[in-house]
Structure formats: C-alpha cells, structure tokens
Image (spheres, grey):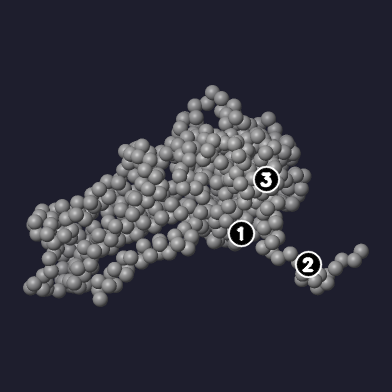
Amino acid sequence: MLIRRPSDIPSSDITPESVYLDRRRFMGSVAAGAAAALVPGSIAACEPAEGRPAAGTEPAGQEDEPTPFEDVTSYNNFYEFGTDKGDPERHAGSLRTRPWSVAVEGHVAKPATYDLEDFLRPHTLEDRVYRLRCVEAWSMVIPWRGFELRRLIERVQPTSNAKYVEFITLHDPDQMPGQRRPVIPWPYNEGLRMDEAMHRLTLMVTGLYGRDLPNQNGAPLRLVVPWKYGFKSIKSIVKIRFVEDQPSTTWMKSAPQEYGFYANVNPEVDHPRWSQARERRIGEFRRRPTLMFNGYGEEVASLYAGMDLRRSF
Amino acid sequence: MKKVILWIGCLTPLGILVLETVQDRLGANPIERITHLTGFFGLTFLLVTLAITPLRRVTGWNAAIQLRRPLGLFAFFYLCLHFLTYIVLDHFFDWGTIVEDILERPYITVGFTALMLLIPLAITSTRGWIRRLGRRWQKLHRLVYAAAGLGVLHFFWKEKADTREPLIFAAVLAVLLLIRLPFFKRLTARRRSPAPATAVIDPARSSG
C-alpha cells in the first residue's frame, strides 16, 4: 500500500482551515437541524446556524435559532477558569484533554476507570439542538454532539442500590487556574436522580456545532440536561458515581437557600435575588418569557408528578 | 490644566464604552456588559470623590477640593447611565417588572435608594444652592456616605459567588470613612498645612 508522505501532498490539495471549519460547522448544523426535527423535545425550528427560522412552528418572537458559535464559545460560566464570562475562553487553553480518564464507581456491576477513547467507543454520536437556560436569566440555543446518558448507564449496569448519579469535574489547579481561589467548593460536582439520568433527553456531550467541544465548553466530556438550569450540566467530567443518597452539589453547598438539587427551569419560582419569569436570549434585545421546564415539559413533567416544585427547587 | 486632566480622566470610561459599542466588542451579552461597566465606573467615581477630603488633609494639597464637585457629578452621571441602561436596554420600559424588582429584590432596592439619595446632592451642588443652604448644605451632603454604602451593598448582593470586587470596594469605603473619625483626624492633623486666608468655597470642609 502506498502511503503518501506529507511532502508528497501538493499544498493545493490541503483545504484551508477556515474552509474546513466552515464546512464542519455547516455540516454540524445541518445534522443538528435534522436531529432536532426527529427528536421531540428538542426544538422544532432548527435550521442551520446561518439559515432562516422555520416558518409557522412557533408563536411570533419565539423562534429558536442556534446561537452563533462565537457567542457559545466566548460567553461561559466555567469558574474553574475564572468567574468572568470571558475567562474560560481566555484561560482554558491550559486544560489537557488527552489523555483523559473517566472513573465509574459506586453501585455498579462494572466499576472501572476508562481511557476516554474506550469510554466513548461503544457509543454512536448524534447531533441535537437544545435550548440552554442559565440560572442568571440568559439563554442560548446550542447544537450539541453526544449520546444519551442512559446508553452508558445500561452499559455499566447499576445495582438496585443506585438511586442517584453523581458527576465530578477534574480538580487540578495547575490546569484550572480558577481553582486556586475557593470561590465555590472544589471539585465541582452535580447529580441527577436515576430517572432523570435515564431520560432520553439527558445527554453525555463531546462536541458542539459538529466539532469537538472547545475546552471552555467543558471538554472533553460534559453533561447536558436541557430542562434544568445550566449549572446542572457539569463540564469536564472525570468521575461518575452511582450512589444511594441524594448528593449535595456544589451550588447547594455554596448557597443552599438559592440553589436546590433539582434546579428545573421554572418561571414561577424565582431565584431569591432575581426573577426567573423572563430571560434574555443571547443575540436578542427584548427579554422573552421563560418556559416551564425550558419548554421540555411534555417530555419531563411526569418525572415530577406530585412534587411541590416550590419546595423542591 | 487640572480641569483638562480631570475631564479626560472622567470621560475615558465613557469613551471605552462607546468604542466597544462601535467596534462591536461588547461580547455576547452587550446589555449586561454596559450595565456592569456603567455601575462599576459610577461607584468608582463615588469612592474617588470621597477620597478627596482625606487626600487633602493628608497631603495638604488644598486645591484638590476643586476636583470634588466635578468628580461627584461624574459619579452621578455614570450611575444615571447605569439606571437608564436597566430601564431602557435591559427591561425596555417594562414598568411592571421594574417596579417589582425595585420593591422585591433587595439588591435592586438598595441600588435604587442609593441613586435617589444622590439626586438632591446633584441638584444642590451649585454655588447658588451652597450659599442658600448654608450650614444645612453640609448636613444634606452627608447623604453621600449612605449612598456609597448602599451602592457597595448593591454590588455585593448582586454577585453570585465571586465577591472579590465588591469586597475591595467595601474595604476602600471603610478606610475612607474611618479616616473621618475624630481619632484619625487628629493623627493626620499635624501634617495639614495652614488653610489659605481666602479659601475656596468649601462648606463641607469640617464634615467632609
């Protein structure tokens, strides 16, 4: 077999990076749009980022166009790299995402530590466009790439003692300079009830806009739970633990009166310091009304039947 | 010359804001950035205004008093921009939400109160009002301490977890207030140069 050495490839055959990136981005958004059309609960009007909103599927002013890539990757809450929204993009270069290992622990038939590649290999990645609603009352629409968390859970076989899944972010102040100050308790951790984790909308994500996750967005592996406030969607995961008791999460520990375990998007339950009734979609001028469960109520409301969402906030 | 430097210094933040807007460098959430910058600069100028009297006492640079009124008015100017940003850009005259915010969100309540306290001070900052109010002018203008305290509290309560910046503001304000206590006044009194016989209009000298 003839393998051409790089010097044999005429430079005219090499696609300029900008074209290549644009193409990937375009393909990604097309795929994302298609995926969204197939997945109920993801938004209906998912055209490519550059495209027009689909007509007639939502009330006027409620269109969900993907937020531009530049905004998705430059406006982030990722305190491991600093508390300013621009800090993650500025400082996340120091994060080494390869090699990366993920430990699966607790009440599972097969506890193990995986190299990331082995961890991901059995899963087929798909693109899905979800709304993301931050607890700070802004929102985006992001074409993610990943797989359903339930596929992973089925694979590692939790025992009947596993009632919750806990996720833990990397703790390494050398790579994550924001961790040198105790702004919030490190390492960051989050958790889901088992039925929430098994819900088909819950994703393990490795990419966005059809490419690998940029570091500032939680590379190489993050969670995405679209009906909950953004802080539940933990980034740069190194440990997944199946536990019997409800874990106390970082924001619950940091300000228990302000952040609860469930953190479902709910326009009727205000944050103690600000209203959650409306939100600013990044790129839009007027605030728009926040939707119950971030608009995914049809799929997820039954998970919380009979619960007082004012108390279990 | 002093005035020119002062105006350049005080208008620089506005220039930064305009430049960032024109060059589309305000980031993904421009309204949030404008809100933050105008509030940050307004509060900064308020603290700088409060630093003039101690500066004067410690250094003996009496002419510094001429900077105090313009600095205070620039603080008021930036804080008005901050409030207008909130009303127009952030909520676009959604009065229901705005009134609810002011009544029910403590950090907005205190911020709003601070701005309201500054309004009479801005109005009575003219020579005419200083003359007309006489000794009452000093008393009235002590409201600036309350406004500064509420402003810092507003900043502190607004932060989600990282309170480093508001704590720095609080520390600076604490120093500026402590310096005014009789004990510290005596400490710095020795270094004070004798007041000129024909002093500039300075009704707040003893209280300021």
Characterize the local packing of mark 3: few (<14), some (14-19) or many (20 or more) Cα atoms within 10 angstroms: many
Characterize the local packing of mark 1: few (<14), some (14-19) or many (20 or more) Cα atoms within 10 angstroms: many
Badge 2 marks a residue whose secondary structure is helix
Residue at 31 percent of width and 65 percent of height? B10
Residue A144: mark = none
- Residue type at tag 1: Leu
Report the residue marked by disc 3. A32
In this rendering, is residue B126 above or below A285?
below
**Pointer 1 or 3: first along the chain:** 3
Residue A95: mark = 1
**Pointer 2 or 3: first along the chain:** 2
Tag 2 and tag 3 share a subunit: yes
Quarter of the image with the N terminus of chain A is bottom right
Q: Position of residue B185 (x, y in %)?
A: 17, 63
Residue at 64 percent of width and 53 percent of height? A213
Q: Position of residue A66 (x, y in %)?
A: 59, 47
Left or right placement of residue B103 versus residue A212 in this view: left
Q: Quadrant of residue B65?
A: bottom left
Q: Identify which residue, B26 or A117, lies in the foreground.
A: B26
Q: Position of residue B167 (x, y in %)?
A: 36, 55
- Residue type at tag 3: Ala
In this rendering, is residue B204 above or below A6?
above
In this rendering, is residue A63 above or below A115?
above
Visible residue check, residue A125: yes
Query: What chain is tagged by disc 2?
Result: A
Report the residue marked by disc 2. A13
The answer to whether the residues at label 1 and label 2 have Cβ atoms under 8 Å apart is no
- Residue type at tag 2: Asp
Residue at 56 percent of width and 41 percent of height? A63
Q: Identify which residue, A190 or A227, lies in the foreground.
A: A227
Query: What chain is tagged by disc 3?
Result: A
Q: Identify which residue, B167 or B139, lies in the foreground.
A: B139
